[in-house]
Amino acid sequence: MVAYDLTTRLIPFLDRHLALPLLNYLTDLDIYNQNQLQSAQYELVKGTNMVDYASQINPHESQDDKKKHIVDTQQQYQQKAKEVLEVLTNPDVSNHLTQDKHKNREILQEKFNLQPNSIEVLYDYGHFQFSSGNYVEAAEYLYHFRILSTEPAKVLSSQWGILASNILKGSFDQALEDFNGLRETIDRQHSQDKGTVIQLQQRTWLLHWGLFIFFNHEQGRDVLVDLLSHTAYLNTLQTACPWLLRYYTIAVIATSRQSQRQKSLIRDLIRVVNIETYQYQDPLTKFVEALYTDFDFNVVEAQLKEIDTVFTQDFFLSNEQLKDDFFSSARFYVVEAYCRIHSHVTISEIAQKVGLSEDAFKSWISKEEKFVVDSNAVYIPTETPNVLSTILDKSSALALRSQSIKQAITSIHEDIPQTPSEAAA
Amino acid sequence: MSFFRRAGSSSDSDSSSEEEELLSSSGSEDEEAPPQKQEAKPMSRFLKTAGGDSSSSDSDSDDSDDSDESDDEDGPKKSRFLKDAPSDESDSEEETKKVVKSAKDKRVEEMEAVIKTLDNASKISDWVAINTEFDKLTRLVIRLQTLNEPIPAMFIKTLVSLDDDLKSDKGDTKKKLNATNNRAMNGMRQKVKKSIRDWEKDVASYRENSEEFESKAAAISAAHAPGVAPTKPRAEKAAEAADADELGFATIGKAGKATDEPTITPETLFRHLAGILEARGKKNTDRTEQVRTLERLLKVASTPYSRIRVLLALISSRFDYNATNQAHIPPQSWIQARAEFDSLIDILISQPQYIVKEETVEYEDSVERKPQSADDIVEVRGSLVSFIERLDDEFTKTLQNSDPHSLEYVERLSAQKTLYQTTVKTQAYFELIKAELPVSRTVMRRLEHIYSKPDAVVEVLEKAASQALGQLKSTITPPQSAFSSTKLVHQLCTYLYNAADGLLRTRAMLSHIYHHSLHNNYHTARDMFLMSHLQENVSRADVATQILFNRTVVQLGLCAFRTGLIREARDSLREIFQSGRPKELLAQGVTQQRYMTMTPEQERAEKSRQVPFHMHINLELLEAAYLVSCMLIEIPKLASATGDPDAKRKILSKAFKRQLDFAERQAFNGPPENTRDHIMQASKALQNSDWEKCRDLIHGIKIWSLMQGETQTKEMLTSKIQEEALRTYLFTNSAFYENISISILASAMELNEKTVNSIISKMIWSEELSATIDQSNNVVVFSKAEPTKLQSLSNQLLDRANSLVELNEKTIQLKFDDGTNKSDDLSARIRRGNRGHGHGQPKASRQQFANPTRKVPV
């Protein structure tokens, strides 16, 4: 059962703080050795300032020294940051500030006696707060820093910090905004020589961090689908983190079938899955492959069952609604394919293929407009277009259009002789 | 003016034109000199009368250097050898033996000889002769100047006496002289005036006190090069040296100590060396003689320093061959050069206190140097990395220029092992002394030796290399317990990725991809290829890299073919074959261009680019792979396109289609003779879904034997042929059936039912086939929705009529809408635009990677 768990692959691309919820989830699942999990958690927490948490996990090791040190630093930072914040919260200041960061800097320095390096304090304090697990404060300080600082590297870093803080404090609307901002920043970077490697790395992180948003925000799945319809990110997925194909597959299949793009999305998905078979396979990709490449419905049936365990094991997929959406769509695609290929499809047969009892299947399919259930058979009503009638349709339109052209020409012709006569008059 | 002309012309090639001659000669003449034709006549007349004076003929060919140079050289030489020659004065008979003379001595002698003739000529007021001799003299002086040697006093002396002569001659003799002579005299006057201006100071001091000046100059030149002063002792010394030349060196070798002999002290050794180095690259240097001397010097050299110096000189002079006459270094010299380079590296490894560097602090050339303390390091000027690269280049050149089917080629190729040993050793040495750039360059050379070779060969090379290394360790390539060429290549490449600059990195990348393809790691190779983004900018790379790129793409295609990825194989190979010039693109030979003639230079450049034969990728195999891939893709496509004329145009593999059409036009098809025949007949069999015949024909292609994993490839091809035959059958015959049993199809194609099912399902799903599967009866039911011929034709007609009307609408709008109906126009445009983008642009896929824009090496 451990086989489908991706946590070990995801963690290297996540922040310590972001990885913690994943581990906690695993603890509940009980598929790994609890002791190992606990030590892993402890390792993660040790690197942060969350002393209490650490001693909670591992009470044997004393954290008192560290705690004392942390409290001290916090006081120092608080002192420094207070001064800065005082200035910044002054309503006068915000009236003076403009879009130009450099100009802001000058204004702050001249009028409010705020040295540029005191802005740095905001960054340090924000970072400190984040490390201590106070995400709300962290997001706030880093936000102030980001809009004031002119140092690109630190601004980028603060953006990551804000994104993580917002994710962890659960405000996904905010996080989505940050996510898009960060994405723009990364895409804007020039890809030169070693720059490409860094860009690839950052995109990989973004994709991983984004998982929190993709599966928690209402429009999250659309964002994921959107993101991966860009070649740059799709390539990132293919080269650096093929395991994310699982989430891509789910997002594409669960996307509303009414969407115009759905067909092309599925086509792209099939292609990517086929290309990546050699380096990543899981029930989701196998399902896609069996359904659309091999058309082996027995495998499809088996994989659908496997997918169920995937959903229960995956931290990001634990959402019941998502699961329902996915299975409903997946069933639809299976039935669609099966009906199109086969001439006589009985309910018992197809219900088995999609892993439902006959009654459950009947109640499900009655909601799908595309299929018609006739006593014991299911089919997709197709109207084979009558060749003759299409030909007639096409030709009648032609005649009409040609006539209008003709009229246009004659009216122009009538106009032309009028003009000189008018001129004469 | 003439001064500079001469200086320039001595380096000119033989091709200096008639015009230049005219310029130079008229320059030496007076302003009102008559045109060339008139002048030439009296000249030649004069020549006849002057007789015997060989030097005057030089004035014609002054600018064409080679003959001239040798003339210069011949003059004094002849005089030395012929006892009764007028210029041969006190130079003793000992000199007739072959003497190892420094170039300096030779020049001084030359100058003496010239001055002698000059004196004689001035005695009889033969100004024409004086003129030419003086030119010669100035040229000699310029050469001395460029070599930073002191100007002998005799030159100044001659100058002054000439000046005096001219001044005294002024009025009276002028009338006596004939026209030519007169003109020459005037020319002389100008030249002398100019020269005196150049040497103003020396001339002045000479005029003041001639004797003192002379002795001073002699002292200077003596100090500058001991033993060169034209005095009696020098002659003796030379004689001794001459003796030593023949016997001395050998005996010293026996005695074991060079310092015992007075003549070959380390100092003389360095002086000899300096002489040789100076003469290097000059036109009149005898290269073989130099090499011989250096070999002797090497025997004498006993200290590490002297050995290093001599070896450096020796190796570089081995590489001195006439590039215009010879295409490559003589094999014998190459072998020796390699051995010598090897010993040089050995010395450097065993003597870590000596280091050879490109840039060093200035040091005295002619002094023996030793490390002063334990951590003192003696730096010697030289470039090891250029030696190893040169060795490598020359090795390639010898291979390029020998017939690949001869024994000679094999013989030369066998030298690769030793070269590889040396390369590896050099690399280890560079690592030892931590020279980064040379390491990466050497690693690249090493990589180039192994990346395209099969494992067995690499293993042999590596074994030899590890023997050569001995105690030496390489950190880049630590010895492996179990040999794996992939690992080795990986180590080398990763080093280059981190250390090297753009070009080396690109080449390393390509070699790495090539190697992976060779080992059937298609996915790794393809991913690397895509990640490198090389196809985007390879057109800006140099030709050699482009060739490597082409080789890599092709190899990748072959790899895909072996792996059974037919479409990928076709895409990779297509570019090369569509160009119609695969030979050139892979640098494996030149096909005659019909409308292009190449200049000899182009031809030579093209030849120098060729890949040596043993690294060739078999073109016939490539073509077979390409055409078979095309067959498997295009035949079903053609079958599905019957009745639809537009579909035929969508065929991508034009080359294949052309050949197929050609084959179809043939009235008779004999048994297949070559690969192409095989594939064309196989294609026909596949069209008839006769998969067994098709398989037999494809398997009958002999060239597959060159493919690695031949049997697997054939098996793969068989199953592909079966599948495609099934598809073709369904396409061609579906119209004639109501239903077909799947089990019958399966048995006919010898496929299992599951595969047949899946193939048919796929065709139905992708709407290639309008049918359904009746799974209870296990049959395919074809729906007769296929339009009849009449219907499809009328559909076509309607489509065309439609586009005609659309065109009309557009025209009307353009012609008569004078801007009044903007909104209509806009809406129409939007409608049209929407139609264009209705389905969303298909993303650039990773599969379509093989569309590099490649420049063709010309």
Image: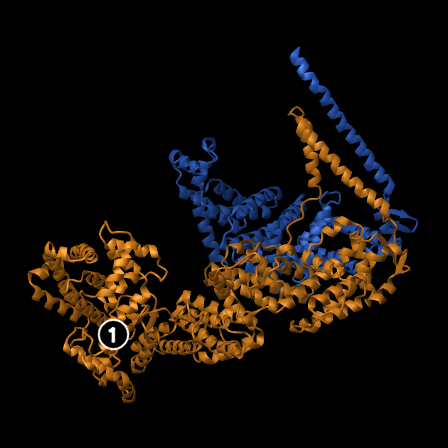
**Residue carrying label 1:** B77
Position of B801 relative to B686 (above/below): above
The part of the image, by quadrant, that contains residue A369 is: top right
Position of B114 relative to B415 (above/below): above
Position of B456 relative to B632 (above/below): below
| Residue shown at 74% from the left, 52% from the top | B648
Total tally of numbered discs in the picture: 1
> Which chain wears blue?
A
Residue A404 percent coordinates (x, y): 77, 28
Residue B690 percent coordinates (x, y): 81, 65
Residue B270 percent coordinates (x, y): 26, 75
In the rendered structure, the colour chosen for chain B is orange
Instruction: Say whether residue B504 is left or right of residue B344.
Output: right
Residue B104 percent coordinates (x, y): 23, 71
- Residue B152 visible to an observer of this rendering: no
Crowdedness of circle 1 by 10 Å Cα count: few (<14), some, many (20+)? some
The part of the image, by quadrant, that contains residue B548 is: bottom right
- Residue A18 visible to an observer of this rendering: yes
